[in-house]
Image (cartoon, rainbow, N blue to C red):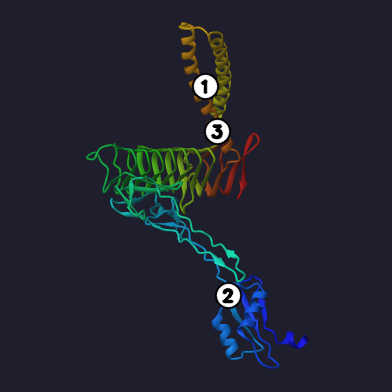
Amino acid sequence: MDALFQTAPQVRVSYDNMKVYLYLPQPQEGGYSERDVMNALANSGVVHGIDKDKIKEVLTEELYDREYVVAQGDAPVDGVDGYYEYKFDTNFSKKPKVRPDGTVDYWSIKMVETVVKDQEIAQYHRAIPGKDGMDVKGKPLLGKRGRDQAPLRGKGFRRSEDGLTYVSLIDGKIEQQNERITILPVYEINGNVDLSIGNIDFRGDVIVHGGVCTGVTVKATGTVTVDGIVEGAKIEAGKDIVLRSGVMGASKASITSKGNISAKFFEYSRVQANGSIQADVFLNCQVSCGENILLDGKKASIVGGEVGAIQGIVVDTLGSDGEVRTHVRIGNGLSVVRRISILKNKIVVEQANLEKIEEGLEILKDAKNDPRKTDLLRVKIRDSALLAADMAELEKLEDQMERARGGCVKVIGHVYPGVCVEIDELKMMVKEEQMRLQFIRDMDKIVMCSI
């Protein structure tokens, strides 16, 4: 029995059942047959991927006392999901870059990616299906199936008949949001906007490659980008505003945005943004900001005027050595607190009135052609609309109060006498020049802390 065992083919199957090794001990006499080997494989459960040519080679050349791979499974091949290759920039910065010398490059801001009619905007690469495999014992091994993506959704483009190529239908601004691509019109002016062009009121984005002259109004439902100087003009945007060369307002300029504003500088201008504002200089400006004001360039300063933000202000230099009166404020004043109180009382009264109206309608629910019922319905519609508007305003103001908590005025460089700092309803006058500090609220007073 021991001699027979020593001269029998020996089979070893890898742990993953993907390879089979054959070992033939040196026979004491005679040799091995192909049937001996096949029986040994069968006894080990090997049924797939057998390399009969290799077995013949081992037997013919009498390759003894060493393992040889005589069977291999087929590994599964994973498929590749389909994907889109976009032919436009989908990830550009909407914030200016800071140069090595500390100055801010407002030309680095990119608010709009534009395309022209018939431009290819995307190429679809179909999914690769994948392939199932099998181990040496005949067990199927499933390969991952490659999945195709749904066609692109949106407007302003067309899809080729084979579904692989997407092409712009118009000249305009392209943007990708929530797996939708939208191409919208862009009004682009290659020069100055002056009285010869007239006022602009455009549904979409406006790009001005020159300046905007005094007396002109530029309005857009989207973004407004101006390469040149803005003079005493009026600019309004439903989204962001980028003024690469700044504003020389001459006390006539008005810049209003429902989004963010970025500009090289503002002089003698009125500026309002629901979002944040970033600039190098505010000189004698009236500024109102719904979030943060950031002036972080090498010569970033606020000199003169009134500059206010709900959440916070960061600036290098606040005021000037000439002690120009400069007023900065953060948070919410007493007017906001009073308005919240008024709205809360008003909402209680409106809700009580609506309850009485509901009671009256319940009493008259079976009455037909009763003018009292018609009058009550009219009053209900009117009062419901008033209540909804007041509740929306209250929610907005309470959110504004919450966002203002913990805000501060941070001065990286110098702060000069003549500066007035206001946080909520509190005020503080700076009486001597200081450096590197922040103004914060501590209970019922404003305190200065070193940075």
Residue labelled with disc 1: 387
The reply to whether the C-beta atoms of the residues labelled 3 and 1 are less than 8 Å apart is no
Q: Which mark is residue 230?
A: none
Q: Residue at x 36, y 53 (%)?
A: 163
Please tell me whether residue 296 is drawn above or below residue 306 in the rendered image. Answer: below
Which of label 1 and label 2 is nearer to you?
2
Q: Which mark is residue 332?
A: 3
- Earlier residue among tags 2 and 3: 2
Under mark 2, the amino acid is: Gln
Under mark 3, the amino acid is: Asn
Most foreground residue, 173 or 5: 5
Give the SS element for disc 2: strand
- Earlier residue among tags 3 and 1: 3
Residue labelled with disc 2: 72
Please tell me whether residue 72 is drawn above or below residue 2 in the rendered image. Answer: above
Q: Give the residue at the far right of this rendering.
A: 1
Tell me residue 451's x, y (percent). 60, 50
